[in-house]
Amino acid sequence: LTSPPLQINRTSHHEIHTSAASSAIWASPLNNYQRKSVNTIRSRSLSTETTWNESSLPEKIKSLDEYKVLYDFSIKDPNRFWKMAAERLDWYRFPTKIKNTEFDYRCERGVDIKWYEDGILNACYNCVDRHIEHDHSTAQQVALIFEPDTPTESRHHVTYGELLRDVKKFANVLKKHGVKKGDRVTVYMPMVVETCIALLACARIGAIHSVVFGGFSANNVAERVSDCDSKIIITSDFGVRGGKCSPLKAKIDQALKMKQCSAVNTVLVFQRNHGMPEMKDDCADLRSSLEWKDGRDFWVHEEMEKVNEICEPERMNAEDPLFILYTSGSTGKPKGIVHTTGGYLTYTNLTFKYVFDYNPGDVYMCTADVGWITGHSYAIYGPMSNRATTVIFEGVPTYPDVSRYWNIIDKHQVNIFYTAPTAIRSLMAHDDKYVTHTSRQSLKVLGSVGEPINPEAWEWYHTVVGEKRCPIIDSWWQTETGGMMITPIAHAWELEPGVATLPFFGVQTKLFDKATKKPLNPPNSGELCISDSWPGQARTLYGAHERFVDVYFKQYPNYYFTGDGCEIKENGYHHITGRVDDVLVISGHNIGTAEVEAALDHHDHVSESAVVGYPDPKKNQGMYCFVTLKDDVEETEELRKQLIKLVRDMIGAHVTPDFIHFAPNLPKTRSGKIMRRILRKIVEPDISNLGDTSTLTDPSVVDDLIKKCPRTK
Ligand code: 6R9
């Protein structure tokens, strides 16, 4: 029925690396890591260890030397490097043009980013069909393991064969409802298998998905629906997280009553646990009380009955958009980051394979929701284009108890686990026994993303969770970068706690001085920019190219500006210091708030902290520290004094917190980032002007902070 796309130099998927081999490679550096020495990159003789033959990319990066050779090649000859990377995918037409990019807004062409521009492919085909076509037995391989919020609820495994059938059928449902190539489709779903089906089905027919995180308010949904002018919404009757039922369809109903959403004519509704016997009472109530507008609202399970299983993947140009994902800017309305098909898929495919050292048969789990970029790149497109088996986890790390992650790892024998520092910090606040009573022997690689990981959290993750067997992949990247940018490669080189280490292939970093705007030569600290394009880079902001250029390309002409601060050390390792707007200037000293937070977090009683500045007439700025204590620790004056002393001792006597505010909870985004913007407003104080707080997990946290803050009195 379908003619398979041309196969060009496909890399073999059949080479099996044993876990014993990987841990042997890692064994010797591991014993050394605790020295925390800066001088960790030892030069070995180049080339002797390198077996790479330059005709295609190696399956694995085995050492620092191998990395260096390949890195240099990727910078010197990006066209050849990224052509070889593209050979990991299947194309209907393999591109003849690889890189065609311009970063300089001052030239006639302006900022313009194109990769593989005459290539033709389909992302869904690359994530599902091709694995089965190359090896029919893959139809029986588990693609997705669904782990529901309640551990006792029946769960299901979905094979690549079943996934392909459902994706084709759902793609036909979309077509039946008039969705065409290039149309935008808003997806408002919990973290369930059906969400992957929805995204892949969009990709299959060339529709552009725009996922809005399931926790966002109706207002937020409406804003994002109207910004990209989507006429169709895919949702679920409800979602379940932490034992609570959350109304999704009802939120959509609310959003659709708003003027901005008047163009929406179709809502496709999945049933959260269709065909499953168990359902909590509150969930059953929610389902039975749903508003239903005939002609607009449709149950997906009913629509699926009416379509067949034949659906050819759409032939997409490499530069056709794959998706839009909104990310909040520091000001103004959210930015609709646009990623295109060929470059994004090549980049997420290669980073996933190399960075995690993914080998066939490995079970992989990413705790990120698909509502943010990590869920797109490393729960779906990266792993699935590598034919991985992925755990899709619906719930939260602390329900029903704080052993949840570790129990899931044992239950599904997870080998590679990718989570966020916020989760690690919240779990390490509890007794280690919640970790140590589980086995975790299956683990080979542990990843971290989303925020700087402080050395204590890193050590805990490494020692208690990974029992010093697993490298910690502290990967720095952004929604805008599409995939990992500065990151260790598993088992290839020595690590330092809290240090993201080295740039990925093709990524060239450059530091600038914030005040003079002049480039800085490492070792140094400054604002982090990227000198040249990489395939995973966002191409524009949806309908707002000028804003794209303003935000990312005007600060430092001819460079992509990341908005993050970075220290590049003597050994070339990169240490991300946090957003550059998080630097305080106190009595002429520049103080990174992340540094102060790291010092506070060092204290045994501290779970996490957030440091912000406020205007001070004498010192320019003062330093205000929010500190969350571990379970059962008392807030005492003595502890306050200890913390102030700790900061002075660890950083310098010029760094003295003016306020220590014990806060049981901090305001966080849905993806777990502390919203320092709001904390700054509280301590300024400028509480009448907190900005949008609807993206917070728990807006009531803010009121508690305001009540207790001495500066708002
Ligand atoms: C993937 C993702 C991007 C911002 C980024 C930076 C922070 C992410 C980090 C990190 C230090 C890491 N960030 N990973 N900071 N070390 N390993 O999180 O995308 O939601 O767009 O956030 O997150 O500040 O600029 P996004």
Image: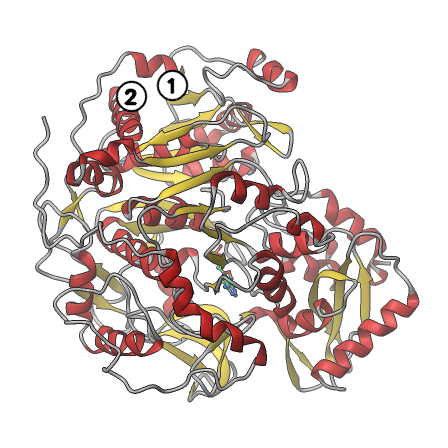
Q: Is residue 253 above or below residue 136?
A: above
Q: Give coordinates of residue 181: x percent, y percent.
A: 22, 35
Q: Give coordinates of residue 185: x percent, y percent.
A: 35, 34
Some atom of ligand 1 lies within 8 Å of the CB belonging to the residue at label 1: no
SS category of the residue bearing label 1: helix
Q: Which residue is mark 1?
A: 300
SS category of the residue bearing label 2: helix
Amino acid type indicated by mark 2: Val
Q: Earlier in the sequence, mark 1 or mark 2?
A: 2
**Looking at the image, can residue 547 be seen?**
no
Q: Mark 2 and mark 1 in contact (Cβ < 8 Å)?
A: yes
Q: Give coordinates of residue 485: x percent, y percent.
A: 38, 65
Task: Please give the label number shown on residue 280.
Answer: none
Q: Which residue is outermost to the right?
A: 637
Q: Which residue is mark 2?
A: 173
Amino acid type indicated by mark 1: Val
